[in-house]
Image (cartoon, rainbow, N blue to C red):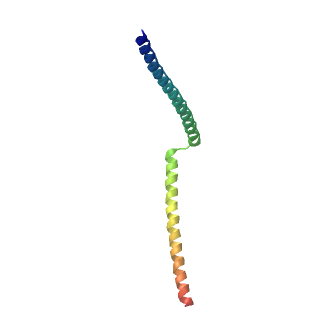
Amino acid sequence: MNQTATMTATDLDRLAERVERAAALVQQLRDDRAKLERERDELASRSQDVHHKLQGQDPAALLQELSALKKEQREWISERREVAHRIETLIKKLEKLEA
């Protein structure tokens, strides 16, 4: 009987450990679920904000405008380089006149 009681106590200890591990796992899963729900809600809110900002705007028109702006930017850069080159040429001519 003593041996049976010892085995039962050992079995109960192992069962208690397993129950504790299972409870810890369940708690971790609950925490993870709560975190994921918060992230989902935040992303849904951000998505809604973006949707409201873009509402009424045609994506094709936005892309066309972006393309035009990039072209204009390239033109300005080219013009700026041209002006810089002309200024350098004028400076060299002035230096020759001063010498």
Q: Position of residue 53 (x, y in %)?
A: 58, 42
Quadrant assignment for the N terminus: top left
Q: Quadrant of residue 90?
A: bottom right
Q: Is residue 53 above or below residue 96?
A: above
Q: Position of residue 11 (x, y in %)?
A: 43, 17
Residue 5, above or below 51: above
Q: Residue furthest front?
A: 2
Quarter of image, res 37: top right
Seen from this angle, which residue lies furthest bottom? 99
Above/below status of 92 relative to 59: below
Q: Quadrant of the C terminus?
A: bottom right
Residue found 53% across the figure and 73% down from its top: 83
Residue at x 49% of width, y 62% of height: 74
Q: Position of residue 5 (x, y in %)?
A: 44, 12
Query: How many marks do you count on the picture?
Result: 0
Q: Looking at the picture, how far across and down is residue 81, in whole percent? A: 50, 70
Depth order, front residue of 61/3: 3
- The residue that appears at 51% across and 31% down in the rendered structure is 32
- Nearer to us in this view, 54 or 16: 16
Residue drawn at 50 percent across, 28 percent down: 29
